[in-house]
Every structure is written in structure tokens, then in C-alpha cells.
Amino acid sequence: MEKIKITGTDQIYEIQSIALTAAHVLQIVFVDALPPSWGEDLELYTAGDVLATTLSGWTTVYRIDGQTVYLSDDGSIYTPSADPEPVAPPEPYEPTLAELQASKKQEISTACEQEIYSGVDVTFADGSAEHFSLTEHDQLNLFGKQVQLAAGVEQLEYHSDGQACRYYSATDMQLIITAAMQFVSYHTTYCNAINMWILGCESTKELQAIYYGADIPEKYQSDVLKAYIALMKESVSDENAQVTE
């Protein structure tokens, strides 16, 4: 086992190892006792107590860790890393009223589109009723049927949801087209009024209360929407009167 002695002293210390751990740091692992002081050359002896070499300049205690001593030859000493400052979690982002309004308008637009696409029930002169979807493709088809009607076609091929294509009379086809156009126009008008309501909101609470199908405050109702609402109320009154007769 190797041994080490500080020049000018008589005490010899057994060591387990000695090695450079950095350009200016020497690590010495002692078996038992540590030298009480430093400051002279280090004499390194082999296991047979033969002087192997003398190490000069390692006079500064860089760090001591138990039985391990680190010396430096440039006067440097170990400085422990400072604990990092705790990082506070970021505050949850609070969207602005304008951002919430934009999001609400998108929500309403999607709901309006889905409502229109779901379609409308049409009651014919004979009392039968069928349901017709109104996707953009369906609306284009009905526009084409309107052109055929204007050209004087008496029978027009079309189909209701889930049914095979069949011929409709010009009268029935006009009922389908009229009902579809009114349905699309109403929901488009209603959606526009809700958007005006959204833009008029002055608080998040007021904005959160808005949903598709809600009763729109009168000050946000356009004349067109008011006319549709009056027409719908009149239609309900007529249906109720027919039931009671």
C-alpha cells in the first residue's frame, strides 16, 4: 500500500490512491488519519517504503470529503453550486374578453352549421311528412331544382333522408324548396343576431350565458329576425287552433 509524507515532518500516512481529477486538482484517499496541516512538498513512497517521487506545489486544500482530500496547485478551493432558485409555476393564462368572444363566435358558427345540416321536416298537401337534410351539397341540389321548376318541369326527382329517389310533383318540390330556404335563412339570421349579442357583451359571465338556441335580447334582434319570430309564433298559434277544433 502506498504511503505519503509531508516534507519536513516525520509522520507517514497510508493511502489507498492518489490521482489527478482535474488539471489543477489532486485527489488523495487516506486509509486512516489525515495530515493536520499542509503547505510543503508531498513525498510519495511505494509499498516497500521506497521514495518514489516528490510532488511540489500542492499546498492548498481544495476540499475534504471524509477520508478523501483534494489539493490544488493554483490556490483554488471548492465552491459548492448554489441551489437553484425555486421556479414558481406559471400563472394560468387568462384569455381576454376579445379572445373569448372570438371563441364563442366560432362555437356558435359550428352549432348553426350543424343545425342547418340536420335538415327540416316538410309536410305535403296530402298530410304526409318527410325529412330532408340540408348539407351544402343538398342546398346546391335544391337550387338546381328551383331552376328546373322555373323552366316548367312538372315532375322532379329527389329523395328524403333514408329513402330511395322518387318523383315529386312541382307543387311538392316547391314546398321542399320553400321550407329549406326558410330554414336556412332563419338560422343564418339567428346566428348573425347572436354574433351581435356576443360583440355587445361586456363581461365573461354574460358571454358564458350565450348558447345556440338561447332567446336573443330584443336589442340584438334585427328586423328580419323579429319577422321570423313573429311568423313562427303565428304558425304555432295556427297549429294549436287546428288541434282544438
Image (cartoon, rainbow, N blue to C red):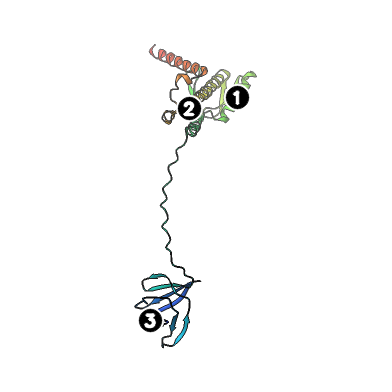
Tell me the quarter of the picture where residue 17 sits.
bottom left
Q: Is residue 12 above or below residue 105?
A: below
Total tally of numbered discs in the picture: 3
- Mark 2 or 1, which is nearer the eye? 2
Residue 194 horizontal/vertical position (percent): 48, 25
Kind of element beneath mark 3: strand
Residue 211 horizontal/vertical position (percent): 44, 28
* Within-10-Å neighbours for mark 3: few <14, some 14–19, many 20+: some
**Sequence-first disc among 3 and 2:** 3
Residue carrying label 2: 198
Q: Is residue 139 above or below residue 228?
A: below
- The outermost residue toward the left is 32
Q: Give the distance between the C-alpha atoms of the residues marked 1 and 3, in whole angstroms.
A: 102 Å
**Sequence-first disc among 1 and 3:** 3
Kind of element beneath mark 1: helix
Quadrant where the N terminus sits is bottom left
Whether label 1 touches label 3, CB < 8 Å: no
Q: Is residue 4 above or below residue 21?
A: below
Kind of element beneath mark 2: helix
Q: Give the distance between the C-alpha atoms of the residues marked 3 and 2, in whole angstroms.
A: 84 Å
Badge 3 amino acid: Glu
Q: Is residue 4 above or below residue 210?
A: below
Residue at horizontal 47 percent and vertical 74 percent from the top? 20
Badge 1 amino acid: Phe
Residue carrying label 3: 14
Residue carrying label 1: 143
Badge 2 amino acid: Ile
Residue 232 horizontal/vertical position (percent): 46, 17
Quadrant where the C terminus sits is top left
